[in-house]
């Protein structure tokens, strides 16, 4: 089964979100793309980043999606917000190695990036790379991730 992917952003990340949305729609690895906004022209275009990160995290927690790629100015705010949701592991990553390790070491369901930090072509490439990684539950990293799960009790 393909990935059910959320894309989201605040107004500071909306251009990159829309580009990754277009890329995801053309990506055969993606089964469903869910755009949680913001979108230009929406009444809620200026919705603060915490709402975006929390909404994405809750949708993953509730089983409505598998993974999310989120943008804000830095990527930091949407990551902090998503990480407030129990069971969610969100990471801000702007380089290829961190993108890889966010999945293979940390089993992150959420990648965040900053539109004010990196160029759009790098963001697109990193999104594409990130979607290609899957966590290995039999790896040595699994016990470390389990510590987080145990702490949260979920
Ligand atoms: O982490 C926060 C984001 O970068 C956001 O897009 C901008 O937030 P600010 O307007 O508070 O700097």
Image: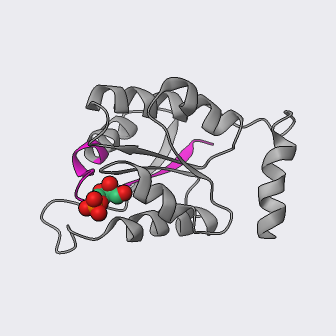
Residue, far bottom: 43
Find ligand 1 in the image and state its quadrant. Answer: bottom left
Give the magenta-colored segment's residue range: 1-17
Q: Quadrant of the C terminus?
A: bottom right
The answer, for residue 132, to whether it is visible in the render is: no
Quarter of the view holding residue 60: bottom right
Q: Residue, x 22% and y 45% (percent of image)?
A: 15
Residue 68 within the magenta-colored segment of the rendering: no
In-front residue for pair 117/58: 117
Residue, far left: 41
Q: Residue, x 59% and y 69% (percent of image)?
A: 85
The answer, for residue 5, to whether it is visible in the render is: yes
Q: Position of residue 82 (x, y in %)?
A: 52, 62
Q: Position of residue 11 (x, y in %)?
A: 22, 58
Residue 13 within the magenta-colored segment of the rendering: yes
Q: Residue, x 49% and y 40% (percent of image)?
A: 30
Q: Position of residue 41 (x, y in %)?
A: 12, 65
Q: Quadrant of the N terminus?
A: top right
In this image, 99 relative to 107: left or right?
left
| In the depicted structure, whether residue 16 falls above or below residue 152 | above
């Amino acid at each position: 089964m393909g990935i059910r992917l959320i894309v989201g952003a605040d107004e500071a990340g909306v251009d990159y979100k829309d580009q990754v949305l277009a890329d995801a729609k053309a990506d055969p690895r993606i089964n469903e793309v869910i755009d949680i906004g913001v979108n230009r022209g929406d009444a809620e275009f200026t919705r603060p980043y915490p709402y975006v990160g929390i909404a994405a995290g809750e949708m993953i927690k509730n089983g409505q999606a598998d993974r999310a790629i989120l943008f804000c100015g830095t990527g930091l705010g949407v990551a902090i917000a998503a990480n407030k949701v129990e069971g969610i592991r969100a990471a801000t990553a702007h380089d290829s190695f961190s993108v890889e390790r966010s999945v293979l070491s940390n089993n992150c369901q959420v990648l965040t990036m900053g539109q004010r930090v990196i160029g759009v072509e790098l963001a697109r490439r990193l999104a594409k790379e990130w979607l290609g990684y899957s966590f290995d539950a039999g790896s040595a990293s699994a016990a470390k991730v389990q510590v987080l799960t145990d702490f949260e009790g979920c």
